[in-house]
Image (spheres, rainbow, N blue to C red):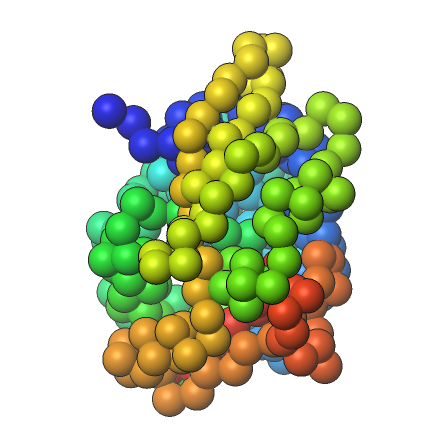
């Protein structure tokens, strides 16, 4: 039986690219470039690349980047967009819980809940971070965003998703946050690229800063920094608060 995130991304490439949360690509890539000092020699892995929005934007800017995703449908959309832009990008279908890379990349990015933290168990989420780490060279850097548990403790997730939803976007309903597991259970309703209406039962794991810091420490990172993640405007000046739906994590091996 397919998991909700597998069903969600079937035939959902064009609609996904129109979602509110996918509109910050250029600004987010500006930040990524700055973090690697605009070094075109840096080899990058976009893990959970989806339709390839960050992969393609970074490739346009002259970077050597590989995109990996679990969804063949999302990858088909990514390859189509890359071709339209005259770009040759290596897009691979792999499960982030079982990657084939070892000490190959200088930077791994996972932006907008790419792979992590959508898995059904904490062990699986950990496995993704572990594989991302194995993919990095010594002294490599990991940059990712994840759901902020501090937000969930102090705000209504359902109210937030309603306020940030536009007509035609996916809607999230009946959110129930479990304080014992830090998982939000919800119902997502959307139309796929063929106009088929779908309803899925989902659950996503929210993390607190100490959890992320400890997990990364156990994986051997020597430095972990966490900031608020503003759509399209990542900045080291944004201290994480309870008002941030996502947190931005920057870790160095």
> Does residue 196 sit above or below 148 in this rendering?
above
- Viewer-closest of 226 and 108: 226
Q: Is residue 176 above or below residue 27?
A: above
Residue at coordinates 38% horizontally, 74% vertically from top-left?
211
x then y, percent, for residue 249: 52, 72
- Residue located farthest toward the bottom when viewing the structure as drawn: 222
Q: Which residue corresponds to the image point at 50% horizontal and 31% vertical from the top-left?
A: 187
Can the viewer see residue 135 in this picture? no
> Going 34% across and 59% down the picture, which residue do you hit?
180
Q: Is residue 165 visible?
A: yes
172 vs 27, nearest the viewer = 172
> Is residue 243 toward the left or the right of residue 109 in the image?
right
The quadrant where residue 196 appears: top right
Does 84 sit left or right of 121 as displayed? right
User: Where on the picture, by quarter, is residue 6?
Assistant: top left
Q: Measured from the top left, where is residue 138 in percent x and y?
A: 33, 81
Where is the C terminus found, in terms of image quarters? bottom left
């Amino acid at each position: 039986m397919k998991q909700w995130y597998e069903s969600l991304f079937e035939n959902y490439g064009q609609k996904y690219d129109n979602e509110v949360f996918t509109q910050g690509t250029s600004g987010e890539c500006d930040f990524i470039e700055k973090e690697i000092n605009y070094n075109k020699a840096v080899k990058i892995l976009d893990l959970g690349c989806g339709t390839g929005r960050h992969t393609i934007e970074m490739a346009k800017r002259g970077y050597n980047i590989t995109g990996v995703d679990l969804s063949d449908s999302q990858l088909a959309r990514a390859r189509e967009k890359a071709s339209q832009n005259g770009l040759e990008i290596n897009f691979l279908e792999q499960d982030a819980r079982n990657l084939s890379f070892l000490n190959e990349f200088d930077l791994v990015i996972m932006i907008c809940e790419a792979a992590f933290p959508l898995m059904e168990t904490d062990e699986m989420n950990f496995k993704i971070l572990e594989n991302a780490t194995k993919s990095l060279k010594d002294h490599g850097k990991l940059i990712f965003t994840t759901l902020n548990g501090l937000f969930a403790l102090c705000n209504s997730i359902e109210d937030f998703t309603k306020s940030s939803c536009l007509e035609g976007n996916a809607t999230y309903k009946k959110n129930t946050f479990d304080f014992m597991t830090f998982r939000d259970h919800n119902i997502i309703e959307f139309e796929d690229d063929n106009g088929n209406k779908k309803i899925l039962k989902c659950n996503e794991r929210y993390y607190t800063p100490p959890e992320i810091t400890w997990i990364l420490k156990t994986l051997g990172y020597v430095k972990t920094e966490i900031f608020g993640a503003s759509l399209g405007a990542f900045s080291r000046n944004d201290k994480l608060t309870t008002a941030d739906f996502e947190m931005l994590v920057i870790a160095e091996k």
